[in-house]
Image (tube, helix red, strand yellow):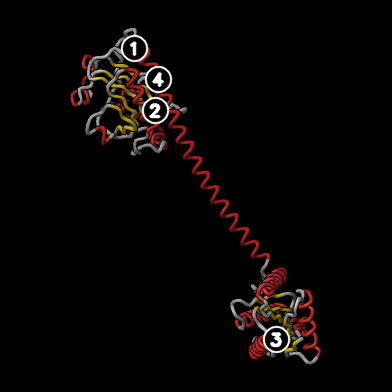
Amino acid sequence: MTELPPPLPADDAQIQAALTDTLRLAAVRETGLLDSIAEESFDRLTRLASTITGAPVTFISLLDAHRDFYKSTFGMGEPLSTLRQLTGRTFCHYSMVFDGPLVLEDATQLPVFRDVPTVASLGVRAYAGIPLKTEAGEVLGSFCAVDFKAKQWTEKDIEILVELAHSTMREIRLRRALRDAEVLNQQLVEQIQKVNALNLALNELARTDPLTGLRNRRAFDDSLELELAVVERTQSPLSLLMLDVDHFKQINDNFGHEAGDKVLRSIAQVLSGCVRIIDIVARVGGEEFAVILPHTDAQGAHEVAQRMRVAVAQAGWLSQPTTISIGAASLRDAESACSLFARADAALYAAKKSGRNRVVTA
């Protein structure tokens, strides 16, 4: 390599300003490599640098504000090979502020450089450092080669170190891209979970009566079909109750729609309190309710209906009594949902026609 004049060292103030620069430190920490474990993808580069240049020690340094952290080391003795960090002034600090590669053939013969602590403590004499720069120009650290005797670095040596520094930066950018992709993927997963939760909530809203909180007609129809499918497999009994609030129009006319809504909500609570967890209570019309009773025969359905009727009649929501009429039907062999619903509805009509506040079984 053509002999170059000795590089002019930067002063301490310039180096300290660079070390503590906010943007530079942010760039170093954003790599996510500080205090990370050794990795083969980086170690391969330092091994290759030593093999080609003949330098006994090669390393990749990342410059934090108060220390050099070595992401990869080759040929370093203890305790550096284990600690992988060094405090105090180092050659990498000068490389950080030097324009281009910092090449020292014998630091002991150069002012200022001879006073770098590692010259005395480790016996460093020759040094070649290539700054690791981001696209924004922030220096993360250096790709370095060191010898313990004076060394005339060749042009090929420096070219190789420059290329390996580029490879190091490509690896750093790849790690950053992978980490960003992982973050984005996690955010995507979270968004999908939120969308799924929202869809479930919307689906539940679409199947829920907003006034009473009971299932609506759509949910009732779906539930009845499902229960019929269960009956087909298990041959278990199934009953259906249809309920209607007696003289509900008069309640709205005399007390207002707000009072009518309160009655419907209160009746919904009473009905829900009269059933088992497997039973299904729904509001299927303005003042009409339906109750699906799985594993319940005609006698059981009549008992449940009477319990509901009495509970509603004894509740005092208004100055006048509020009652319900109920029609009950139990599933016949091979009967459809439509037929079962029609028979229960006909029984409800019969209950209202015969005086209200009563239960009629189809």
Q: Earlier in the sequence, mark 2 or mark 4?
A: 2
Marks 2, 1: nearer the viewer: 1
Location of residue 271 with respect to 89 vertically, above or below: below
Q: Quadrant of the C terminus?
A: bottom right
Q: Amino acid at mark 3?
A: Ala
Q: In front here: 26 or 14? A: 26
Q: In front here: 305 or 324? A: 305
Q: Is residue 271 among what the camera can see?
A: yes
Q: CA distance from mark 2 to mark 1?
A: 24 Å
Report the residue marked by disc 1.
Answer: 154
Question: Which SS class for mark 2?
Answer: strand
Q: Earlier in the sequence, mark 4 or mark 1?
A: 1
* Circles 1, 3 touching at the beta carbon (< 8 Å): no
* Percent x, y of residue 199: 63, 58
Marks 2, 3: nearer the viewer: 3
**In this image, 164 relative to 6: left or right?**
right
Q: Amino acid at mark 1?
A: Thr
Q: CA distance from mark 2 to mark 3?
A: 84 Å
Question: Which SS class for mark 1?
Answer: loop
Q: CA distance from mark 3 to mark 4?
A: 90 Å
**In this image, 345 relative to 152: left or right?**
right
Q: CA distance from mark 4 to mark 1?
A: 12 Å
**In this image, 238 relative to 133: left or right?**
right
Report the residue marked by disc 4.
Answer: 162
